[in-house]
Amino acid sequence: MFKKYKFFDYVFFIYNVIFIGFSFFQNDYYKYLILHISCVVFQYILISKVNEKKHNFITLIRFSYPLLSTIFLYQELNNFITIFSDKFYDDLLAKIDRTITGVDISLYFGEFNLKIMNEIFHFSYLSYFFYLVFLPIYFFYKRKDVILNYINSATLSFYFSYLIFLFIPATGPRYYFFNDGKTYLVGYNITNFVKNMVYNGGLYGGAFPSTHCAITFVGLYYLVKNQNKWMYLWSIPVFMLFLATVWCRFHFLIDSIAGILIAFIIIKLLEFFKVNK
């Protein structure tokens, strides 16, 4: 059954098996059973039917499906976030931030509260979807030798972070400092769009670690390592995104640092064990 499975396939499979088990902790467990069993069946059919030697759209889906699946699997976590702990660790994370910077860094940035800056940083935060959707397309069509490395590292970074959410739930600065989850940061259309998207579709309790920082770091790492001619240009929006996670109050600083460290450790472990070969 697993003959054609790659490392990222096993990660996706194991994650779904884990949540099949977690489903029985829910009153309406059958919904989650159906979801995760369907994921496993879809995965098997996709892998068994796709000819990887063909360089077409279906093959691209075969490589990128674990990342695309994170969107709806992320939403599901709203129902599991307190499965192991009904305690949120924002007090601890805010204390770590103050130890690092000497201030509540999100509130410190908020003192500037310039509309144009808020607009720029909310746009930078939104650029995360480039790494989720368009970077796999770029690697697939332009650097096929890199796609496996990127998908392996990004998939494990994502799903490992999702599991951490369940053990260290945290709401982030926008809820910790403002009980209703709203912020007085004001901007223009992009700021309002991103705020509404996060408030309506975000995960309450899934701030630590920052998957935004983890995945963008993975993308930048492989762009730099493979000497992409745009690598230095891409480092600017990546840095802006890292800063945006804190500026926009979606994450504590330690959330973002943890996301980068997790991604870096995973990349190096996969290289050490030659998983991508």
Image: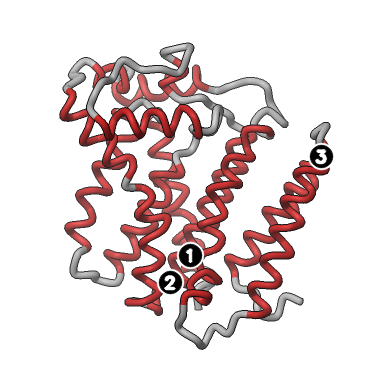
Q: Position of residue 71 (x, y in %)?
A: 53, 48
Residue 7 visible from this viewpoint: yes
Is residue 95 shown to the viewer in this render? Answer: no
Residue 113 horizontal side relative to residue 207, left or right: left
Where's residue 25, x and y in %? 81, 35
> What kind of element bears circle 1?
helix
Question: Which residue position holds label 3?
Answer: 29
What residue would you read off at disc 1?
151
Answer whether labels 1 and 2 touch (C-beta < 8 Å).
Answer: yes
Quarter-wise, where is residue 17 in the image? Answer: bottom right
Q: Nearer the viewer, residue 57 or 15?
A: 57
Q: Residue at x 36, y 25 (%)?
A: 249
Q: Residue furthest bottom?
A: 53
Provide the secondary structure element on which disc 2 rests: helix
Tell me the distance, in whole angstroms, between the alpha carbons under discs 1 and 2: 6 Å
Decide which of 128, 10 is in the foreground and name it: 128
Dot placed on the residue nearer the N-terminal end, 2 or 3 = 3
The answer to whether residue 168 is left or right of residue 261 is right
How busy is the neighbourhood of tag 2: few (under 14 within 10 Å), some, or many (20 plus)? many
The residue pinned by badge 2 equals 147
Tag 1: amino acid: Ile
Give amino acid for label 2: Ile
Q: Quadrant of the N terminus?
A: bottom right
At label 3, which amino acid type do we have? Tyr
Please tell me in which quadrant of the rendered image residue 273 appears.
bottom right
